[in-house]
Image (cartoon, coloured by chain):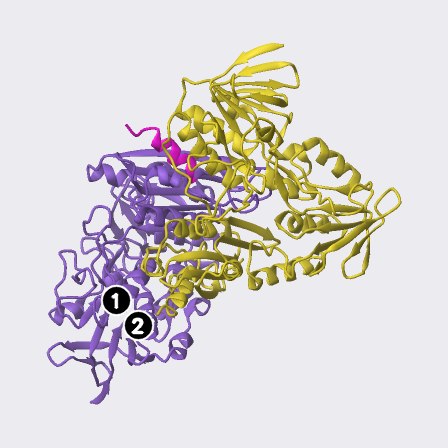
Chain colours: A purple, B yellow
Amino acid sequence: MQSIKTDVLIIGGSAAGIVAAQAGKSQYPDKEFLVVRKEKHVLVPCAIPYLFKTLDSTRQNIIPDEPLKNAGIKLKIAEITSIDRQNKTCKTDDETEITYDKLIMATGSTPIIPGWLKGASLENVYTIPKNKEYLDRFIQDLKNFKKIVIIGAGFIGVEISDELTKAGKEVTLVEIMPHILSAAFDPEIAFPAKNILEKRGTKIKTGTGVKEILGAKKVESVLLDSGEKQEADAVILSMGYRPDTGLAKESGLKLTDTGFIETDKHMRTIDPDIFAAGDCAQKKNLITQKPAPIMLASTARRESTIVAMNLYGPSAANNGTIPVFSTSIGETAFGAAGLIETFAKKESIDIITGTFEGIDKHPGKLPNTNKQFVKLTASTDGIILGAQVIGGQSTGELTNLASFIIQNKTTLNTLITAQIGTHPLLTASPIAYPLIKAAQAASKKLT
Amino acid sequence: MQSIKTDVLIIGGSAAGIVAAQAGKSQYPDKEFLVVRKEKHVLVPCAIPYLFKTLDSTRQNIIPDEPLKNAGIKLKIAEITSIDRQNKTCKTDDETEITYDKLIMATGSTPIIPGWLKGASLENVYTIPKNKEYLDRFIQDLKNFKKIVIIGAGFIGVEISDELTKAGKEVTLVEIMPHILSAAFDPEIAFPAKNILEKRGTKIKTGTGVKEILGAKKVESVLLDSGEKQEADAVILSMGYRPDTGLAKESGLKLTDTGFIETDKHMRTIDPDIFAAGDCAQKKNLITQKPAPIMLASTARRESTIVAMNLYGPSAANNGTIPVFSTSIGETAFGAAGLIETFAKKESIDIITGTFEGIDKHPGKLPNTNKQFVKLTASTDGIILGAQVIGGQSTGELTNLASFIIQNKTTLNTLITAQIGTHPLLTASPIAYPLIKAAQAASKKLT
């Protein structure tokens, strides 16, 4: 058994682990930081759907290790098999004992394969793990498949559907909810997304679950709740991810009801020398203060940054986060931040809404002008709680503007009288800037 | 003499006038709003540079009157020739007397033709007024010109240079300052802008003023301070705009030293029933609290909205604004918000800066990925004061995000721990999001 000693040990080398190491080392340059990860290569997690057509191979989607090394961060490829919290050591699968002073759990998440789903272990049933070797094999296998059924129309399901359709496959996307992307968007945003996806060639079946995956040895078809049988050469399960917290549990760290590592507002676990960040760590919604299973690399970034600031004494608090999503289907992009109307209703939160549809350049005769639609939700006293956007390529950053406005507990009137900048080729017109026009529409409903 | 009566009279029908009328009518639906403007058609002001190539004609750049009419706002095409504040009436050039209860001055601005510039009245010397008939004639005249000298490399000068170059003209852009766009950007942002503009074919002469425009009757050449003579079939003066405040002055309203209509923080002039908004109205910088000649349609929008809220009693305050600019030269866009380093130095304001260069999609192998550079300025206690961006088509909204962050007096740490959303096709990566990485770089300089 080899022995290593480090000041800060980070378990996991995806977004959470990388940012924790970089931000930590930047703040504490004299401390030694060691990242231990299982994977030889780390994939850009959010770009995995684009491996199926837009990017040529996983090689184009690797997060390079050089920035870590250049920052003086050590890296070890191995699996941590146990944590001895008493002695502050970890053991690895290559017979190494690592002594740490501070430990950051950044173990991420793995695809959900529901136990109730019969046929899930048939040949040619796939999930989308963040694993280069698995995905390389899958991409190789795909050459033999024509008909593909994708179960679950969240972002991963939707994005892969479009990519595989572009790659010439016959794709059927099955979703038990009445709309695609229904965890992120209200129906009036999800519906146009479905229309575009369908126009681009994906067959979509919403409002129906899956009973069983059928086949002798290999997948042959998918039996839907509706009784319909959908032929399939392969099935992709995109039914969400669960936090990868087996190691945390075995080492006696406390987990939440839904299996995330419990932390305080400084992102510390019940062990004051162990922190957690990213998909494996507990999250709560800033607005509702309830548990929120937001598993995004951008959320991981935020949490890891907070962990890095708190390593040697509390300095930054995590008072909760908001979901901030965006995606693009063809030329049309969709974004959401904060509390959507559907979710407010479900939680019995009183809200007002305001919408506006304009264009994302001005005048509309300029080339590549897209429609831009904004829907805002606000509390009945005028605090902006949520935003949804349909638009062109500026949708991601416009959603980030909305996200900041929401986190800042901005009132409708503050937004309405804020200074925004406009340019014919880059934004909506100042007299019809949808984010502000939507705020004005909502503000008319204030009593 | 015909007589009309209205509750709210708005003089001027460009961005400031339109927004004042729309926001006012929306807030006070029972009041009568009348917009009086000189121009038969109103052009989208910021898109005027794009008339020279990208848009086919001024017809494609007209702000339609329907939204005003549909909102129940009255419109009259005439010039107001005098204001009788005592009797609260205005006279027009078509022999009409208009009685008002509240009056909004939204008279805009006109191009500067410096008195010292010899030869400015020669034939084929043009300015860029917001006037359809003038611009129609100019576009017609342009067919006869090959060599064009543009004097003044602000946004209008730069944008028209690129358009006329695209249209096949031989364009020379002359700027007395060492850099183009130097009122908006620090040298390290202005310099790449110059490089791109030059690569696209515009000849640029910075650091040299103009002595005289030479010619017998028509323009023949431009004599530079450097002694060089630049042949020219036509000259465009893009040397800035001055507030159009003759009417305000004649009616006894107070003007500032630099000729803007003086207002209080509720945008009221010295006459409590008369408001001013847009290019003609006084502005001050939110950060320095000093006069700031920011003449943008987006600034006009904000001011007019505030005026509308205050028409029948103070309800919204204007505590100052920040400049927010963006533009695009070819595929590369440039944005700035708030206090740039150059300006801070000039004003002896102590600042720290942070920069980061990344990419605007992730991974970089995705098609149409652009470099994204962000430079932040912050006070020495960590309040973010300014941002500059070089990037792709999301630059306008990213600049707006920065603008909101600055107006909100956000600290570097608040930005660093904020939740941003990311998507491979729409934004930078969460682990290298330039706005946040620049904040981290700046924050390392905090003592």
Q: Position of residue B393 (x, y in %)?
A: 52, 52
Against A223, residue B178 (above or below) is below
Q: Position of residue B430 (x, y in %)?
A: 38, 61
Indicate the quadrant containing the C terminus of chain A: top left, top right, bottom left or bottom right: top left
Q: Could you tell which of marks 2 and 1 lies nearer the N-terminus? A: 2
Residue at the far right in the pictured view? B216
Give residue A307's mark. 1
Label 2: state its secondary structure.
Answer: helix
Mark 2–mark 1 CB contact (< 8 Å): yes
Residue toward you, B146 or A119: B146
Label 1: state its secondary structure.
Answer: helix
User: Which SS type dominates the magenta stretch?
Assistant: helix
Q: Position of residue B117 (x, y in %)?
A: 75, 47
Whether residue A125 is visible here, answered yes or no, is no
Residue at the far bottom in the pictured view? A2
**Residue with the mark numbered 2:** A24
Q: Which residues are magenta?
A: A435-447
Do marks 2 and 1 both belong to one polypeptide chain? yes
Q: Is residue A82 left or right of residue B25?
A: left
